[in-house]
Every structure is written in C-alpha cells, then in structure tokens.
Image (spheres, helix red, strand yellow):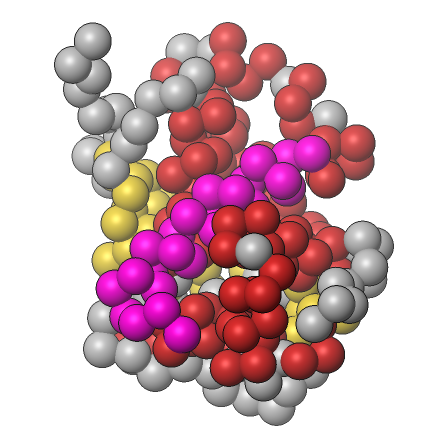
Amino acid sequence: MGDEGLFFYPNRMGRIILRSMEELIGSDELESVLQAGGLTQYIGHLPPGDLERAFPFEHVGALQAAVEAVYGPEEGRELNRRVGVMCLNNGLREFNPLLGIADLPVRMMPMSLKLHVGFDMFAMVFNRFSDQVVSLGEDPKHYFWVIERCPVCWGRQTDAPCCHLAVGILEEALSWATNGRRFLVAETACIAQGDDTCTIAIAKRPIASDT
C-alpha cells in the first residue's frame, strides 16, 4: 500500500485512538495489542496531543489488524467499532476548542439539514487536519461517507470490509447530532478487499424507536 510515512493522522488523532482503546480494554490489554501490531513504541508513550501530522496511516491499519489478531476476527471487529464510538466522544472534547463543534446549533436543525451540515463539518475535520481524504454522496435512501485515502485499513488485505473503527465513529457522531437517534450504518466497499474506496452507507431515516 506504499512506503511507511507517506500519509499521516495528526498526533492528536493517534492519541485519541490509543487512549480510547486503553479506556475500553485497560493498559495491560493495550500493551498486548501493541506488541501484536509491532507498535511497541507506544507502550507507556502515547503520541503528544499536538496537530503535527506524525501518526502514520500504517500504524492505524496495523492497530486494527492487531486487535483482530488478539481477540479473534468477530470480537476484534466489534471492539474496533466500540473504540470508534469512544473516539468520537474523546475527539469532540479534543477538537471542540479549535472548531467550536459542540457550540454549533446542529442539533436544533431539521433532521435532513442537520445531517448535511454535520457530515460537511465532520468531513472537514479529517480533510483539514489529516491526510485522510473524505468525500460525500447520497442517493434517495442513503448518505455515503466515501474515504478515498483510508488510514483505517491501510496496508491490509481482507475478504470483507474492515473499517469498523470508522463505522463506530460515524454511528456515535449521528447519535450526538440527533439527540440519541440511531441509524443503520454499514461499510459497503473497502479498499482492503480491492475496492476503489472505503464507502460507508448511512440510512437517511433513523431506526424506529420502541418507546
């Protein structure tokens, strides 16, 4: 997928991923994952919280693969999704001082408008602060989050979509923007399985609540 060091997340995003994982599984289990992924440089030494683009995409992909190796494919994929959920919450705290995300009146807008504004704002964060490339699309039933240069599966070859971290981030972002509503979110194409992009489809209508 390319030589290491071509593309990067900012240190802050790498730190958010590792901190979120540590909160979820504990420091000892995180150490096991880092060892499995050949990322021992982060044991006891998380990246700094700055915006320097110095957390390689290779490390993001290796971390996802290591979780699946340590916990098994099914449990590992679910864990990566849950880490994504935590990343969104931690990321809002980390990036809000720069962007004023939590102060925007997104959640007071009509549903379709708030989703359009929210996706635009969210894509801007990745496109502005990292080497990840995100574009947006839609059809009558779905919005599409299209990752044209994806760190989550960087360097991987899989038989099925594997960007569960990104799915978890989007699920929680939708919940935050819509006051707790849930949407069907599914990765329908993945570079790791030979597709041109990593494409995540989001249903335009929320899942009906039983309450």
Residue at the spot 48% in from the left edge and 25% down from the top edge: 176
Residue at the spot 83% in from the left edge and 54% down from the top edge: 50
Question: Is residue 171 or residue 120 the one in the foreground?
Answer: 171
Residue at the spot 66% in from the left edge and 27% down from the top edge: 101
Residue 113 visible? The answer is no
Furthest toward the front, the residue is: 28
Q: Is residue 170 left or right of residue 209?
A: right
Write down the quadrant of residue 175 in the picture.
top left
Q: Does the segment drawn in magenta span residue 121? A: no
The magenta region covers 70-93
Residue at the spot 80% in from the left edge and 53% down from the top edge: 49
Q: Is residue 205 left or right of residue 21?
A: left
Q: Is residue 166 left or right of residue 124?
A: left
Q: Position of residue 56 (x, y in %)?
A: 66, 74
Q: Position of residue 47 (x, y in %)?
A: 77, 64
Q: Position of residue 60 (x, y in %)?
A: 56, 69
Main secondary structure of the magenta stretch:
helix
Quadrant in which the C terminus appears: top left
Q: Position of residue 203 (x, y in %)?
A: 25, 35
Against 59, residue 121 (above or below) is above
Furthest toward the bottom, the residue is: 3
